Amino acid sequence: MRCVGTVVRGIRTPIIKENDDLATIVVDSLMAAKESEGFEFRDKDIVAITEAVVGISEGNYVTVDDVATDVQNKFPSKNIGVVNPILSRNRFSIILKGIARGMDKITLLTSFPADEVGNGILDEEILEKSEFHLGSVISEDEYKETFGSWIHPFTGINMIDF
């Protein structure tokens, strides 16, 4: 009888750089983890590698300037709207930096009290005591006045100021 369901392990690797032999790094890291932690690989086990690591090793990624140039070409008005970004993902911050570099004005529409994956962007206790409700539109100034510099507990940053 099976006593354990799905087991997931995060395997630490060296920092991946462009032109690294990703296959060798992954295999070596898996074998080192196996020896260190005493587990075995079995038929039908799955190894997943995040697309970011694959892209980095292949040199297949964009720079902040690439994003800026792309949005300038696509939005000559220099005014862009971004709807429901996942603010808590560090990848988005780099993309937003590129958008800001290429545009004169950004209108950012986000859900609250959490972003699209459920990570908070404000203090819910303050929200409950405020004049705002879940159907409200809150400007940046109103956000700062009401919620101040709320810091996300996992990332340690204020998503709105960032």
Image (tube, rainbow, N blue to C red):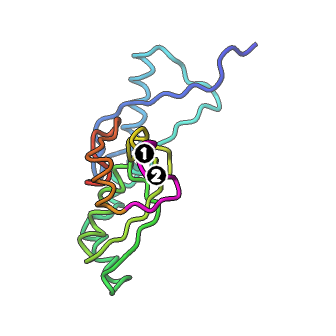
User: Residue 112 — which label?
Assistant: 2
Q: Which residues are magenta?
A: 128-138
Would you say residue 57 is visible in this rendering?
A: no
Q: Nearer the viewer, residue 70 or 19?
A: 70
Eyeballing the image, is 122 above or below 31? below
Among numbered discs 2 and 1, the one appearing first in the sequence: 2
In the rendered image, which quarter is residue 79 located in? bottom left
Q: Residue drawn 28% across and 39% down?
A: 156
Location of the N terminus by quadrant is top right
* As drawn, 41 above or below 127: above
- Circle 2: is it few (<14), some (14-19), or many (20+) Cα within 10 Å? many
Please provide percent x and percent y for residue 110.
44, 59
Kindly check if marks 2 and 1 are in contact, taking CB atoms under 8 A apart as contact: yes
The amino acid on which the numbered mark 2 sits, given as a three-letter code, is: Phe
Q: CA distance from mark 2 to mark 1?
A: 10 Å
Identify the residue at image location x=34%, y=77%.
71
**The C terminus is located in which quarter?**
bottom left
> Mark on residue 127?
1
Choose between 111 and 74: the one closer to the eye.
Answer: 111
Where residue 109 appears, as percent x and y from the top left, is 43, 64
Q: Nearer the viewer, mark 2 or mark 1?
A: 1
